[in-house]
Image (spheres, rainbow, N blue to C red):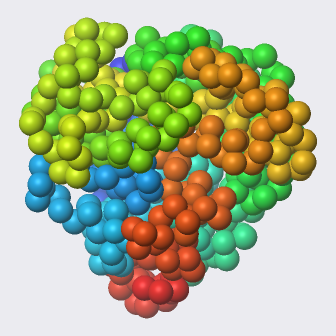
Amino acid sequence: MKMKNKTLIVALFAALMIGFSGCEKYLDFEPEGSVPAENFFETPEQALMGVNSVYAHFRAWEMVSFAYIIMQEIPSDNSLKGSAAGDASFINDYDNFLFTPNQFVINDYWRGRYKGINLANQCITNIPNIAMDDGLKNRYIAEAKFLRALLYFDLVRAFGGVPTPQSLPIGNEIYTRSPEADVWALIESDLTTAASVLPATYGASDKGRATSGAAKAMLAKVYLYNQRWGDAQRLAEEVINSGSYSLESDFYKVFRVEKENGAESVFEIQAQQFDGNWGISMCQHSEVQSVRGQWGWGFNLPTDELAAAFDAAGDVVRKKATILYKGDKTPDGDSIQGVEAVEGVDVPRYNGKAYFPSSQQVYGPYGSGQNIRVMRFAEVLLIAAEAKIRQGDASGAATYLNQVRQRVGLAAISSPTLDDVLRERHLELAMEGDRYFDLIRSGQASQVLGAKGFVAGKHDHYPIPQEQIDLSDGQLTQNPGY
């Protein structure tokens, strides 16, 4: 089953058709299709559909649209609301650290990820009972565990300790927040299993599925968050030395359709446009961020601070690919025009990594056929570099750091500091959804974001959505400061 073909997209319906039996209250979602739970997970084909539904859910609105940009980038120094003045003005609350437990975006982020966890748990619970090839069965379960780990990774970074349902039927764990350390342990367990079971590569018909390299790379990132520097280095170097990945020569093209699932891709959310079917061509990740008045809505604009960071580093290549200014002409031949004014900046500009060439737009929301990068080989190199520098090995860090720098024409640094490595991560991964959490985990948030209103001990995590606390009859506890 090819990941960018109709078979996967059909599985979008499975994402909502699978009955959510055993779920209660805030993990209970109304089925929107016609395949009841009692008739599902009986055949190998249904096992595949079940796993594909988890993949498909990753491009849903709650996963990669407003909640993603608002909670993972807007509070950072990378971006601001943008769009027209007054349009979705609540987004400014995130830029100014005025958000509250009652805001729907935080609830969307929570609900979207638990929908995905519920789909993954359906697979993990039910696929073992299907009579089918054991090797394929184990692979499907490992894929579901990999995807569940990504969902819990988002949740633990955003909220700290969260409920951790892992199977069906669901019991009292839906009402109780697991300690943060236990959530990280579950993520580690899922990724360790996935790394040991998943293949290193797939044939063309399955390209885009989770691999052992993707599981190892994500586990290395988990170890980075948990300051397990030696483990992060070990896993990152396993991926680097596998020979399965390399940097693309052209940084701009890394984010274009022609390089999807290419040499630099470790894991991507798969997307596609389909003739005459807006509902299937549904991913709005690019549309909400793209040129207002031309293709998109114009939210999540790169800041003057990000532009200055590129300029200070002499980083012409990544700046040009990351920030599209009004009047620019892209290598794909589009002239960036849009509206005369967007909120928060003097010169209109947009997230270049979300740009989608107009010549390739056919159906559905703008950019709905463009994959979303989750883990790139460049990040694996930077994980290894940070793990090395954290252990006092500057020359070892330089080996990996300079591969990333040289790709964009920057001079090598022979003896880098931690600041050098973190700065490189900032510029390389700008607007890809990591900056806010990177500032928190690296201890830089108070310094960088304090003037915007960041308060250490409070904004290290988002509030638990009040709607979820209410639905749990108060058994879910709130984070400090809210």
Return the residue nearer the eye: 442 or 195. 442
Q: Is residue 152 left or right of residue 193?
A: left
Mark yes or no: residue 376 visible. yes
Residue in the picture at 65% in, 64% down: 443
User: Where the C terminus falls, by quadrant?
Assistant: bottom left
Labels in figure, total? 0
Give the vertical position of 323 relative to 473 (above or below): above
Would you place residue 72 above or below residue 267 in this image?
below
Q: Position of residue 368 (x, y in %)?
A: 29, 29
Q: Position of residue 447 (x, y in %)?
A: 55, 66
Front position in the image: 403 or 208: 403
Q: Nearer the viewer, residue 481 or 180?
A: 481
Name the image quarter holding residue 363. Answer: top left
Residue lying at 36% horizontally and 78% vertically, measured from the top left: 101
**307 w.r.t. 227: above or below:** above
Q: Residue at x 43, y 69 (%)?
A: 451
Q: Residue at x 47, y 86 (%)?
A: 481
